[in-house]
Amino acid sequence: MNSYIKYAHQMKESGQGAEATAYLLEKASAGDVDAMEALCDSYCYGNLGEKSYEKSIYWGQKAIDNGSVRSQEILGIQYLNGYGVAVDVEKALVLLQQAVAGGCMKAGRFVGLYYMEKNLPEEAKKWFLEAANRGDITSQYHMGVLYENGIGVEADLNEAIRWYKLSAQRGDRIAKPATDALARLGCEGDANIGSVPKSV
């Protein structure tokens, strides 16, 4: 993670969001790309207290122009959902796919979710798999759902369980859907994730 984004989270927790914003603005205005990226992230998610999609897009575009992959993901999400801008699916998918190509772990998940909404599960699976293989536990969970229910793939309960276990092993709240799925399938408490599912 960008060190400035970590800094923003720490400053918010200590009640110094305004000071951190001023610091990041100073750095970004001087051309620091990581600071631009951190402002894009912070304004989008309100990490420093102020939530402004418009400011997020402003700093995100500057960061993208200077090579920021993380900002491609954030702006892709905003264009996909109309956060501070008119919905532009074509632009959103271009940004998200560029983020995937640049090595972003989570970007493929959002492409996959879009294609699931469009009832194109085979295309969705391709993007979930991309993110899942990079360690995105939410995409790993979605891979489990696809295999459990035979959506876009041949149903395979063993493959589903392996994906759920891979997702659940982190054990935090983000992993809860996977741990719930394992409990439903009678596999709770089994920490053996076995081999990583094959990419098919």
Image (cartoon, rainbow, N blue to C red):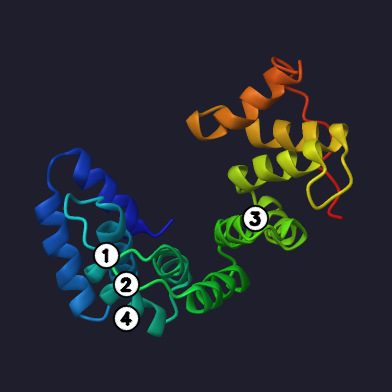
Q: Earlier in the sequence, mark 2 or mark 4?
A: 4
Which residue is at a point 65% across and 55% down the rendered structure image? 116
User: Mark 3 = which residue?
Assistant: 116
Three-letter amino acid code at disc 3?
Met
Which element carries disc 2, helix, strand or loop? loop
Which residue is at a point 58% across and 60% down the rendered structure image? 114
Q: Residues within 10 Å of mark 1 (few under 14, many from 20)?
A: many
Q: Earlier in the sequence, mark 4 or mark 1?
A: 1
**Rendered position, 36 above or below 38:** below
- Cα–Cα gap, marks 2 and 4: 16 Å
Picture coordinates of residue 113 (x, y %)? 59, 55
**Rendered position, 13 above or below 36:** above
- Of the two numbered discs 4 and 1 in the rendering, the one whose residue sits closer to the viewer: 1
Position of 165 with respect to 104 (left or right) is right
User: Mark 1 = which residue?
Assistant: 53
Three-letter amino acid code at disc 2?
Val
Q: Nearer the viewer, residue 161 or 146?
A: 146
- Cα–Cα gap, marks 1 and 2: 8 Å
Q: Nearer the viewer, residue 40 or 15?
A: 40
Q: Quadrant of residue 1?
A: bottom left
Labelled pair 1, 2 in contact (Cβ < 8 Å): yes
Please indicate, yes or no, whether residue 180 appears anywhere in the rendered image.
yes
Which element carries disc 4, helix, strand or loop? helix
Which element carries disc 1, helix, strand or loop? helix
Position of 52 with respect to 188 (left or right) is left
Picture coordinates of residue 66 (x, y %)? 39, 83
- Cα–Cα gap, marks 4 and 1: 14 Å
Res. 62 mark: 4
User: Mark 2 = which residue?
Assistant: 85
Three-letter amino acid code at disc 1?
Tyr
Q: Nearer the viewer, residue 64 or 56?
A: 56
Q: Earlier in the sequence, mark 1 or mark 2?
A: 1
